[in-house]
Image (cartoon, grey):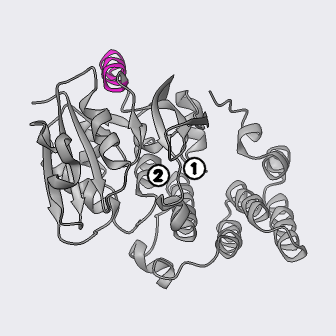
Amino acid sequence: MPVVSVIMAFHRVTPHLRPAVRSILHQTLTDFEFIIVDNGTGLGLTALGDEGRDPRIRLLAQTTNQGIAAAHNLAVAQSSGEFIALMDYDDVALPRRFERQVATLRAESRLGLLFTHADAIDATGRVIEPQFTLATEREQRIFSAYSMPATPPTLMGRREVFVNLPMREEFWVSPDYDLFSRAVETWPAHALPEVLFHYRRHAEQTTVIAQSLQVQNASRVRLLTARRRSGRPETSGALAEEFGGWRNHPPLPAVTYAEFARRALEENFPLLAVYFARKLLSVRRDLSALKIAAGVLAGALRRAPGQTPILLRLFFTGPLRAHALRPV
């Protein structure tokens, strides 16, 4: 049994694919299997060039692009490692990533999931700036109600976390956020504060070309998380049906944020409603958006007068200052 099962999927071949694969093959911890899912290109190992000859690589091929979640679940089902590590096909893992993550997970037996700190790089590989990372268990648990607390493809965890909580295929985008928000309710998580990963930002990444869908999917995760953590059922029906045709035709981010602010207020989640109102103003600053956001804030203050200070801090300064969270 290998120490680590590395999971990566690709649905197109870019100049960043082979460097991503190479960065895994050059890890200082060498006892791993590298499960790569060809999500519909049909090119298989030929897309990887010389790197594809490494015996630790195992290719799983799908005839069409089934999405990130389906590819991930397929790979987990075929894996055998003690730990599972995520990897994206356009990023770079620094050489000691696996070594440091495995050592920490073994030293902290109660820990289920572990991120690392990361730097953002551009299409040429130049370091741009540090990635957002919250390091502590407390911070990650709190911030998971709003978004991911660290860079998703830096994640490594115990095998049972991923086996017991498969990614939900209803989330074409942001299935990793949905998985983490559920996992952190059972397994502690934190992040190594050292940079062990380079996250590539470029014009063709999914968060750019599918921004409206990403906003809609992440907003759904936030609402479902609020329901779960309040002891309510996530949804009365299939997740894919609750928002109708929004997967195929997601509205603009401003429409999504306004709708979810309304829903969160109706369901008596005042903090989440105010967060959505703030996000609305981050993408649209006109009189109409201001009226909607102010109305949501007023409604939240009426529903939860005892939370007035944190609601106002959240609206005007965001969740980090409202909850006294300190990124690395």
Question: Could you say whether the residue bearing mark 2 is in a helix, strand or loop?
Answer: helix
Q: Position of residue 13 (x, y in %)?
A: 31, 58
Any part of residue 199 in sight = yes
Residue 142 in which image quadrant = top right
For the stretch drawn in magenta, what is the main secondary structure? helix
The answer to which of 319 and 21 lies nearer the viewer is 21
User: What kind of residue is marked 2?
Assistant: Tyr
On the image, numbered disc 1 is attached to which residue? 147
Mark 1 or 2 closer to N-term? Answer: 1
Up-down relation of residue 31 to residue 33 (above or below): above
Which stretch appears magenta? 97-110
Question: For the residue marked with disc 1, what is the amino acid?
Answer: Ser
Q: Position of residue 310 (x, y in %)?
A: 80, 44
Give the residue number, with chain letter if any, for mark 2: 177
Q: Quadrant of residue 94?
A: top left
Residue 101 is covered by the magenta coloring: yes
- Going 18% across and 71% down the picture, which residue do you hit? 63
